[in-house]
Image (cartoon, rainbow, N blue to C red):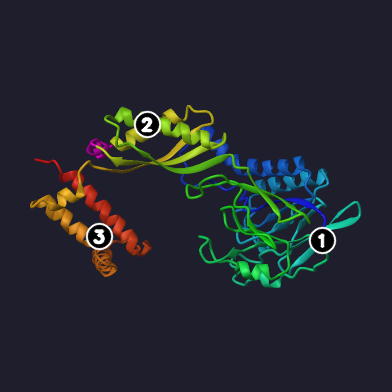
Amino acid sequence: MGTVRFVHCADLHLDTPFRGLSHVAPDIAKTLNNATFASFETIIDLAITNRVDFVIVSGDVYDSSDRSLAAQFGFRDGLSRLAQHGIPSFVAFGNHDPVSGWSNSLEWPDLSYRFDARDVEARHITRDGTIIASVHGISFAKEAVTEDLSARFQAHRSGVPEIAVLHANVGTNTGHAPYSPTTVAALAERGFDYWALGHVHRHQVLRTGAPAIVYPGCSQSRHPNETGPKGCCLVTLSDSGEPDVRFVPTDVVRYQQERVDVSSCATIDAIQRSVMEACDSFSEEADGRHLILRLALAGRTHLQRELRHGDTHLVLEERLREDLLTRTPWVWLERLILDTRGPYDIQSLRAQQDFTGDIVREYTSMLEGDADDVTRLREEVETDMRTWTAYRLLTQPSVEEVRHLAERAMHETLDLTVGED
């Protein structure tokens, strides 16, 4: 079948804002505003440097169908750079940028091909006049596509590598909307060598070969739940073995959610030092990227009441944020969460025959009870909350979420009572 090399990327979401960061420092805001574009430029550089045969973009180039002109310019200019180096590009659009919202007002390079939404199209890639691969793809006609579009694909079995490009939800536990739902087994039956998927923002290799089925993930995180490295895949298909799929980070700013144990800290200053040391380590692990941290203080500490008193927590958060901004690359403390506990022993308190013991026994009885006990508690709380005007906006918590909230309530109650005269 010969050998071909290509870049597979998806979910660029060009020119979309970072969530929950409306009050960051001006220099950080500038970096964030340019991050999705800079990540895409890194992908283009990767393709040119490695002299790939083509580039695939598997949907969600933009964040919405009313895509900004800046996003269109950025995408078009990147594809033009590829074309100047003789590298064709193949683009399938997804739920965030369906064909129905596409603008034809810009002039696109000849070597850039955008798949239509009417049916699967196949395009050949040639080298010195010889066909070396074929790329098959289809775009979303509208945002909410519930049809399994993979059923429309069928490889030609032409003897050259055949790649299928699709924005789709494979499986049921991806954490994303079930658009174009399909399964690994269904994809494996279509005869392709590689499925270039988009939609899921976490890099995953669902199958390593015959065929390889791959999500490259998004190229740049934009909110705290998209943690860790983000990037694209550099793929080589050949006769010599299974596809070589190499993940390449392209992110400019990286999100992390971390915990720092402060149980050994005797003072607030000691907590501050521990956090700064931990953040230096997190920054080193981010491979030179800027870092946005959601940080939780954890452990049992004699400073519990002080941490929860007044605005102590908020003042500490702001002080840490200011100190971290002096780092290069910068670290932005997005949120400081208190998940500490007092130094008391729950089992000892439970054995006490006093008011505190009564509190602990009441809580632990519920926490150790069966799901019916938790369900009854949830129903009691809901009865009390139904008169609240915003009640209709709430989603019903799961049994485990109710247990977590009850445990947290127990500890916060004990923080206020244990040790009091």
The image position of residue 130, as x and y in percent, is: 89, 56
The residue identified by callout 3 is 367
In this view, the residue in front, 211 or 68, is 211
Q: How crowded is mark 3: few (under 14 residues within 10 Å), some or many (20 or more)?
A: some
Q: Residue at x 64, y 57 (%)?
A: 214
Instruction: Verify whether residue 315 appears in magenta.
Output: no
Q: How many labels does the image show?
A: 3
Badge 1 amino acid: Val
Asked whether the viewer can see residue 342, the reply is yes
**Residue that protrudes farthest toward the right in the picture:** 129
- Residue 61 appears at what percent x and percent y? 65, 53
Q: Contact (CB < 8 A) between labels 2 and 3?
A: no
The CA span between labels 2 and 1 is 57 Å
Q: Quadrant of residue 365?
A: bottom left
Disc 2 residue type (three-letter): Ser
Tell me the quarter of the picture where residue 341 sits.
top left
Q: What residue type is labelled 3?
A: Leu
Could you tell which of marks 2 and 3 lies nearer the N-terminus?
Answer: 2
Q: Is residue 79 above or below residue 135?
A: above
Q: What element carries label 2?
A: helix
Question: Which residues make up the magenta segment?
Answer: 302-311
Q: Earlier in the sequence, mark 2 or mark 1?
A: 1
**Left or right of 14, for residue 323:** left
What numbered label is drawn on residue 274? Answer: 2
Q: How far apart are marks 2 and 3 (CA)?
A: 33 Å
* Distance between mark 3 and mark 1 Cα atoms: 60 Å
Closer to us: 335 or 366: 366
**In the rendered structure, does residue 309 fall within the stretch colored magenta?**
yes
Q: Nearer the viewer, residue 244 or 201?
A: 244
Residue 160 has which mark? 1
- The residue positioned 26% from the left and 56% from the top of the image is 406
